[in-house]
Amino acid sequence: MTELSHFDEHGAARMVDTSTKAETLREAKASGLVRMAPSTLALIRARGLAKGDVLEVARLAGIMAAKRTGELIPLCHPLPITSAAVDFTFAGDDVLRIEATVRVFGRTGVEMEALTAVSVAALTVYDMCKAVDRVMTIERIRLEEKSGGRSGVFRRED
């Protein structure tokens, strides 16, 4: 089994030293679901919530979160992200699917940035809709694929 890279030989937390890694194009895609009442999803589709266009606000929140991941997660490197996109799909009458794609030309991957973008976009959807649907759930936030770097390509199989 691979050792955890964020701990030294004495068990102390550390930021991984990436200074000897090659700079390559790195990309990661993550996804998540927000499950809600069908009437709530209908309001989102119709842009009928009093707070405004839920998807556009959530998109901006996700992009901003990707750019600030290094400030939010203690051992993540601050990265000069070259691209961050957040997209939405209506995956049924009660499910909103969120997907984030993040790219960087750098020495470490952007998996955490993509996961953070999805998480914050989902939380923003919840925040904007909670007045009409407090039983929404945020589900299955996960890495879908990543490329670049020494470990190569990962694609979720299911």
Image: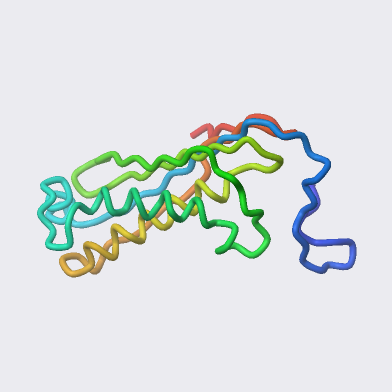
User: With 106 as the anchor, is 122 left or right in this view?
Assistant: left
User: With 40 as the anchor, is 107 left or right in this view?
Assistant: right
User: With 138 as the anchor, is 66 left or right in this view?
Assistant: right
- What colouring style does the render use? rainbow
The residue positioned 12% from the left and 53% from the top of the image is 43
Q: Based on the displayed image, in which of its 4 quarters is residue 9 positioned?
A: bottom right
The residue positioned 52% from the left and 57% from the top of the image is 68
In this rendering, the count of numbered labels is 0
Q: Nearer the viewer, residue 45 or 85?
A: 85
In the rendered image, the residue lying farthest to the right is 9
The residue positioned 57% from the left and 50% from the top of the image is 112
**Whole-percent x, y for residue 79 in the image:** 61, 48
Q: Nearer the viewer, residue 74 or 45?
A: 74
**Whole-percent x, y for residue 28 in the image:** 54, 38
**Whole-percent x, y for residue 57 in the image:** 28, 54
Q: Is residue 40 above or below residue 2?
A: below
**Whole-percent x, y for residue 42 in the image:** 13, 49
Q: Based on the displayed image, in which of its 4 quarters is residue 134 positioned?
A: bottom left
Q: Nearer the viewer, residue 58 or 67?
A: 67
The residue positioned 55% from the left and 43% from the top of the image is 81
Q: Based on the displayed image, in which of its 4 quarters is residue 99 positioned?
A: top left
